[in-house]
Image (cartoon, rainbow, N blue to C red):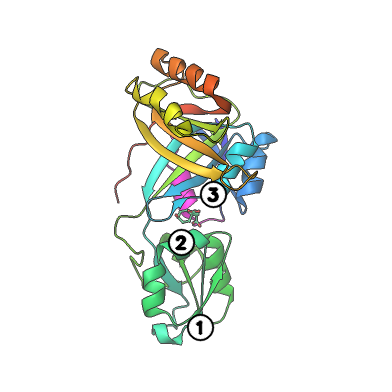
Amino acid sequence: MSRVGYLGPKGTFTEMAAEEYRGTVAEYIPYCDIKVLVKAVVDEKIDRAVVPIENSLQGAVTLTLDLLLKYDLKIVDEVIIPITHSLLAADVVTDLDDLDHVVSHPQALAQCRAFIDEHLNCNVHTADSTADAIKRVAKAGPNWAAIGNYHAADYYDLSVLRNDIQDNEENWTRFVVLAKEDSPQTGDDKTSIICSPRDDHPGALYEILKEFAQREINLTRIESRPARKMIGDYIFFIDFEGHRSEENIQLALSNVEEIVAWIKLLGSYPQAEIQAD
Ligand SMILES: O=C(O)C(=O)C[C@]1(C(=O)O)C=C[C@@H](O)C=C1
């Protein structure tokens, strides 16, 4: 039974994702900061942390990638859910023109950029999560609105002014579940690694990817992040299908190890079942 931390407070999309975690849960615990949440697993205050890692409209949640690099934690599960944003305000607000301020998590603001540009002539503010924004609006004046999950309107006594305001109907966020120990093989797994090419030469990335292509290992994602050294130095986050205990994957990984400066295995874990709306 796990104590499962998630990016809170109550009413975030991460809370919805945490409820889809396939392990056994003793308790759900909200944390208001991703860094503090991830550190709580490192310090064994909780057993699992559920954090957003990528969105289909906006791409990587770079803070999560940086924390995966920094700490020695394993990915033990992934959850992918549809994200539907609403505009929430006090129930006296009926007209968008009455709003002077809109607040949300930067990812949510970015996912609703077209709606904000077209319909809101407002100051835009950022919050630590969509639910944090909703909480703030509940205490602010009636000229404030928040962008977030309509389920949260009831928790914080707000009303829904508009639904479905994200730029695209298809808006999905992928979350990962972090723990100290690895996950066992299920037969339908994915593996995540980070690696850093030894030096900058023609074909450096190709040489890494070739090890997977030759063994018909299907890559599901590749993301680069600055190595934080010279401009142009990158590290690569690579996800692929299969479990680290499978022979072809062991061979690919040991060959990659030979040609990179370093490699970090983030874990093998069951692939997400896509959650329908
Ligand atoms: O603010 C929230 O509700 C969150 O759970 C965070 C988060 C994110 O960081 O991507 C999660 C899903 C959505 O993409 C928007 C925000």
**What amino acid type should be assigned to the residue bearing mark 1?**
Asp
Q: Mark 1 touching mark 2, by CB under 8 A?
A: no
Query: How many numbered circles does the render carry?
Result: 3
Q: CA distance from mark 1 to mark 2?
A: 18 Å
77 over 133 or under it: above or below: above
Most foreground residue, 143 or 3: 143
Q: CA distance from mark 2 to mark 3?
A: 14 Å
Judging from the image, what secondary structure is the residue with disc 1 in?
loop
What span is colored magenta in the figure? 9-23
Judging from the image, what secondary structure is the residue with disc 2 in?
helix
Q: Mark 3 sits on what residue?
A: 62
Q: Residue at x 64, y 38 (%)?
A: 70
Q: Per the image, is 85 magenta?
A: no
**What amino acid type should be assigned to the residue bearing mark 2?**
Ala
Q: Mark 2 sits on what residue?
A: 108
**Does residue 268 appear left or right of residue 9 in this picture?**
left
N-terminal label among 3 and 1 = 3
Q: Is residue 257 visible?
A: yes
Choose top left, top right, bottom left or bottom right for residue 219: top left
